[in-house]
Amino acid sequence: MTIGSHLEEFHDLPVSVFPTSVKGPEGAAHLPAPESVAWRVGVASYESDEAWEEAFARFLASVDTTKVRALVVGAWSDAYDSGPEPVIEALVAAKDRLPALRGLFLGDIVMEECEISWINQGDVSPLLNAFTELEEFGVRGGGGLGFPALRHERLRKLTVETGGMPAGAVRGVAACDLPALVHLDLWLGTDEYGGDAEVADLAPILAGTRLPALKHLALRNSEMQDDICTALASAPVVARLDVLDVSMGVLTDDGATALLTGQPLTHLTTLDLHHNYLSAEIRDRLRDSLEAEGVQVDVDPDDAEQDEEDDGTVWRFVAVGE
């Protein structure tokens, strides 16, 4: 599976594309109220007529940005070859013009523009350090992604979507001090696309020694899904979660059995394991043991398919890789 559609909603707001035709307030009369949508500002990834910073300058000149609550950064020029440093610099420079900004997504880029594992990313910490009132932050793309440990008082939701999340970025997120964070969603990916993290890199999250407000934990889209589930079977953080999401990865009966035989999961409202490589027997056991306790269990194999070579080698794949 690849990402074929842009975000339609972000930060509980419908996404509205800022038009290329608008070049000042005189042309903005037909646009939505600034606070009513999440604004998507992007340019063509290939042979764009303007740089992203130029499109953003038009946005600043046309919209009352003091009321803007959410911003979605779409493609920048040559995202497959260039990082978002100029984009980040432009956003940080405009922070005083975006006092109401509470949601920010960096890299709403789909496959026709640039495959997820070809997206060049960078150090995103300047955005979080500049926008201290952010409640939601998301980023797509793992190539060159930097996420050093930081403290943010207000952030409630953090999403990192990759086909391969670098170990350094995983360790950085795990070491962050985010006292208000309720929802954490990490797409860890595969080693083939730069996802070289190990379960040990997640230790501060699993131990529950950080993220005191966490209720929704998603560690997914990983080729080490069995190891993650084995660790979660005894991880202290699980006891205070409402939602546990280990979907989209290479989950087999070994990992699911570890969850079933580990600590109780009956306090969860949702256990999401969709896109998996489970046997029918294990799927039934998960449903039988948890649904009767009121847990919503998703064990849909979705489009997970495996290939077997003549020598018996079996290949399984995460939901979103390249």
Image (cartoon, rainbow, N blue to C red):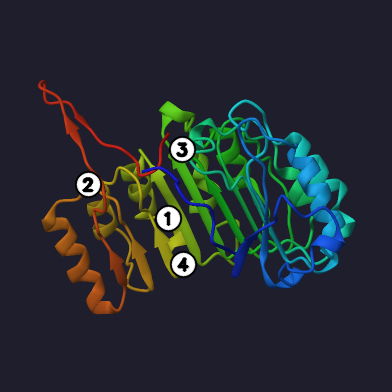
What residue is shown at x 12% (from left), y 56% (from top)? 280
Crowdedness near tag 3: few (<14), some (14–19) or many (≥20) residues, C-alpha within 10 Å: many
C-alpha separation, residue under disc 4 versus residue under disc 2: 24 Å
What amino acid is labelled 4 in the image?
Leu
Q: Which residue is mark 4?
A: 241
User: Could you tell whether 164 is left or right of 85 in the image?
Assistant: left
Q: Could you tell me which residue is drawn at 63 percent across and 47 percent down?
A: 74
Identify which amino acid the numbered label 3 is placed on.
Gly
User: Between tags 2 and 3, which lies in front?
Assistant: 3
Q: Which residue is situated farthest in the right direction here?
A: 96
Tag shown at residue 177 = none
Using the rendered view, name the quadrant where residue 51 is placed.
top right
Check if mark 1's residue and mark 2's residue have beta carbons within 8 Å.
Answer: no
**Tag nearer the camera, 1 or 2:** 2
294 is higher (above) or lower (below) than 115: below
Q: CA distance from mark 1 to mark 2?
A: 23 Å
The alpha-carbon separation of the residues under discs 3 and 4 comes to 25 Å
- Relative vertical location of residue 5 with respect to residue 11 in this rendering, above or below: above
Q: State the image quarter where residue 225 is shown.
A: top left
Task: For label 2, count other residues whose C-alpha is less than 10 Å away and answer few (under 14), some (14-19) or many (20+).
Answer: many
Residue of label 1? 235
Q: Nearer the viewer, residue 151 or 66?
A: 66
Marks 4 and 1 close (CB-CB < 8 Å) = no
- Residue drawn at x 63%, y 41% is 75
Q: Which amino acid is tagged 2?
A: Tyr
Residue 123 in view in this figure:
yes
- First reached walking from the N terminus: tag 4 or tag 1: 1
Q: Which amino acid, by three-letter code, is at mark 1?
A: Ala
Would you call the spot at circle 4 few (<14 residues within 10 Å), some (14-19), or many (20 or more)? many
Sequence-first tag of 1 and 2: 1
Closer to the N terminus: mark 4 or mark 2? Answer: 4
Q: Which residue is mark 3?
A: 163
